Amino acid sequence: MSSLRRLLLRLYHVFRRGPAEEQLAREMAAHLALIEEDYRRRGLNAEEARAAARRAFGGVDQAKEIQRDARSFRWLDDARRDVGYAARTLSRTPGFTALAVLTLGLGIGAVSVIYSVVRNVLLEPFPYPNSRRMVDVLVKDANGGLVRGALPPAEFLDFKEQSTVFEDAVGALGQEMHYSSEAGNEVVSVVLLTPNSFTFLGVEPLLGRYFGAADSAPAAPPVAVLSHRTWVRLFGADPTVVGHTVVLNRQPRAIIGVMPPRFEWHVADFWLPGPISRAMPDSASAPAGRWFQARLKPGVTVQEAEAQLNVIAARRTGQFPGDYPENSHVQVITVIDWVVGQFRRALYTLFAAVVLLLLIACCNVASMLLARATSREREISVRAALGASRGRIVRQFLVESMLLAAGGLAVACVLASAGVDALARFLPRRGVPWETELRIDRTVLLFAFATAAAATLFFGVFPALQAARRELVAGANTGGRAGTASRRQTRMRAGLVVVEVAFCVVLLLAAGLLVRNFLALVGAHIGFDERNVLLAGVSFPPEFRNGAGRNLFFSRCLERLQSTPGVMFAAVARGQPPEIPFTSKIEITGDALDASASSVVQLCSEQYFQVLQLGARAGRTFSPAEVAGRRKVAVVNDAFVRRYLAGGNPLGRSIRLAALATLPRDPVADPTFEIVGVVHDVANQGLGQPARPHVYVPFTVTAPPLMFLLRTAGSPAASTGAVRSAIGEVDPQVAFAGAITMEERMHRYYAQPRFSVIVLAMFAGTGLLLVAIGIYGVMAYSVSQQTREIAIRMALGGSRSTVLRMVFGSGMALLAAGTIAGLAASIAVGRLLAAQLTNVSPHDPVTVAAVVAVVAAIGVLSCWVPARRAMAVEPVAALRQE
Amino acid sequence: MASGEQDRVEILQGTLDLIVLRALDTMGPQHAYGLAARLAQIADHPLPLNQGTLYAALIRLEQKGWIRGTWQTTESNREAKYYSLTRPGARALAQQAERWRRLATFVNKLLLGT
């Protein structure tokens, strides 16, 4: 108690010294007077008494010091004084201070923003406890292709029960269901969860409760748990929603709970109990498989788990040979890797880039501080002469640096919160967990603080040591004139500029390559005009099993849509460019093709060619009668003719599409088609990838899942309502499942690379600006230092162009050295980037040339003003000043 | 001078506080000079103490709340800061004295035993 009281008082006295000092002086004076009085009483005269009193008391100042030490914290008191002094010094040069604080704020802020992205996307994206130990289990083939993600019940349970590496495992099955309300039918995303799932995920519901084993029993009343999104969208965030009934696939279910916003397990609208047992049938019509997610026991690695599951799989192969194609294997992958995938590399690249940016900022501030130390030489010499130790002077400099960093940190916090909001807006959806919430939390703030501290050390220590190392006496002597920088100091500043330029070259190159790559991607022609195209989906209720009935439904909808004003062409197709996933092995009658020959297959209606503007290059496209009559005719693309027919005449040839004969539903008995036409290529393997051979056949030969594609006269989004009402009019039981314009679809396709490009380009631009400031600073300073030399040269007859050459020469030398160093470093960086560059070589000469040109231009610009100033030196005036 | 130094009793760290508390306890409120004079009086050896040294102990004790200083006038009509023992100070003195006695007994035993 008393110690605490003392501690607080000591702290108090650090900041309130005045009154206590006064009291102390008064008390000591009284003390001395009392001793003196005593001595006088003993017979000493006034003079002697005073001397004796002083002797008895000891040193007054010493006593005061002793008391001060006991009263307060000396070191803290000193620190306070240093901070005050530093603040006054900095406020005397507001321009310098503002520039340094802004530069640091920019650097620290940018690093914090990207750190917050890395943290919220890669490190801690999930609200679930121990999510880093959560894994997915998949079966893959020899080429890494997915055999199955959803495991059949027996396999699921074998993996769960026979393994020892998991704490617990949960199963999920995603389904589309029809949600019926007064507003009509709507497709919602429903995920069936094993009863242990919610306890596994460890997130408490926002309202009500979640389901457990009791709700999953066969006789239990049907229940549903709502996602927060759906609660807001369908129920207007009604707080009394628990207990209401929802109708999903015609079955009424009681809502028992609502989950909080960041709970997005399998991104469902509704979660329903979906227990799993060996007794469940494993058929295509009633898929009972489950995605397998588990939490590894602490200390168990992914590799160990994978090895154990492969042993179990090997045992099962004897029992279920069909389940495991040759060379297939079980893969265990952490959930975060599964979700983030390639985007991780992009984010780490951005993080590396932003660290470079911070280093550039630090170099700049260090170089500014060095210049400042030179002009403050006299002050330092005087302080040293008055007894300040080197340690004390270094400390003074460090305190100034710390103040700058603190200011930078404050600016950084403001910039970072704005930056995070801005980034959140164009963060791509793909590669980012739905649970991710970009925000500045305590960890990010701590990180920013640590960054500021590290930056202080980086940019503050050089100038501080430099200042302390100086010959103090020499400084005091020359300080009378405008102090000149020592050679060492000039070298150090020049070195900083070289490093800065090198970093900037690396940044620019990375940004340049990504921009080129992005432009190539965007510029890659999809093969048709993507404007004015609308894509729309439908969803059939579960009892709508009849393939012929579905085809009839589509034909009727198309009739309606084709006569809708504003719709130029309407078609259905199984997939859409730029990626069409369905492929088949092919045989061509009369030609011996490689056994592996395959082609992309598109099942579509006749106007598909008009929607995609695919005019027949040879022959013709389908007629309505051919589609309605289920005729086995085919149209192929240029790539097909080139690859499989060696450019020969394709018309009239017969091709066999084996995959159509083995479709799980409505297989085609004899999938041999006659080629009636050739069209040009459209992208079918992704943007910027060359198109593969492609065969178009009428969708009516089977009954595939289909989408609507419309080419419209005006805005495609305006036709969404037409699609919706056509569906409703043809069959009110069928639900509209959302629409998207082709442009928007392409936009999403670019989202990830666009994110990297924008962020990196911003960093590179900022870096360039900082480098310009840095070069300008060094050159302007060296010109002001060399004023006398320039004046003498001119007085001795040197021409202005010599002066110009001198300034430009030294500036460009720095630039050249930095550029060469940067290009060398870029070879290593190219390796890091290579995986993200699909359309450009990491050593693209155009980009390298452009970067060198930009850096050179910036260098010339930043040397220009100092050079002008140097040329304007009036020899007589300059020399007279000395 | 050299031998004089050797004769002095080194004041152990922390004992000055105890000495001041005890002096205030027996003498009642005192100013710093009064305390110093009293200490010089009872010490057989010259105390290794400039009077100014007392101030560290005084501020320590005051900050702990064990003594309180108030400005008063002396008999000779001068102003001086008088320190008096507070109630927590009296308690602390009892504790410290007890601790000191125990320590002294132990050290004495140790010294006599050898």
Image (tube, coloured by chain):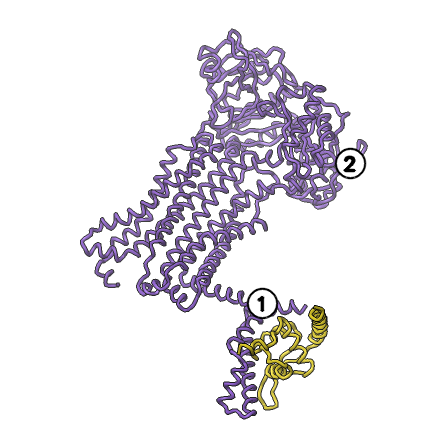
Chain colours: A purple, B yellow
Determine which residue is flagged by label 2: A213
Q: Position of residue A868 (x, y in %)?
A: 27, 52
Q: Nearer the viewer, residue A812 or B30?
A: B30
Badge 2 vs badge 1, beta-carbon distance below 8 Å: no
Q: Residues within 10 Å of mark 2 (few under 14, many from 20)?
A: some
- SS for callout 1: helix
Q: Nearer the viewer, residue A802 or A575?
A: A802
Quadrant of residue A719 within the rendered picture: top right
Respond whether the residues carrying marks 2 and 1 are from the same subunit.
Answer: yes
Answer whether residue B54 is visible to the viewer in this image. Answer: no
Which residue is pictured at 46% across the width and 17% down the height? Answer: A638
State the quadrant of the N terminus of chain A.
Answer: bottom right
Residue farthest toward the left in the current orientation of the protein: A797
Answer whether residue A369 is visible to the viewer in this image. Answer: yes
What type is the residue that disc 2 sits on?
A: Ala
Q: Nearer the viewer, residue A821 or A228?
A: A821
Q: Which mark is residue A11?
A: 1
Chain bearing mark 1: A
Quadrant of residue A601 within the rendered picture: top right
Q: Position of residue B73 (x, y in %)?
A: 60, 87
Q: Nearer the viewer, residue A730 or A658?
A: A658
Q: Is residue A250 above or below residue B82?
A: above
Q: Residues within 10 Å of mark 1 (few under 14, many from 20)?
A: some
Chain bearing mark 2: A
Q: Position of residue A802 (x, y in %)?
A: 23, 49
**Which of the marked residues, 2 or 1, is nearer the chain's N terminus?**
1
What type is the residue that disc 1 sits on?
A: Leu
Q: Nearer the viewer, mark 2 or mark 1?
A: 1
Q: Position of residue A489 (x, y in %)?
A: 36, 54
Which residue is pictured at 45% across the width and 37% down the height? Answer: A829
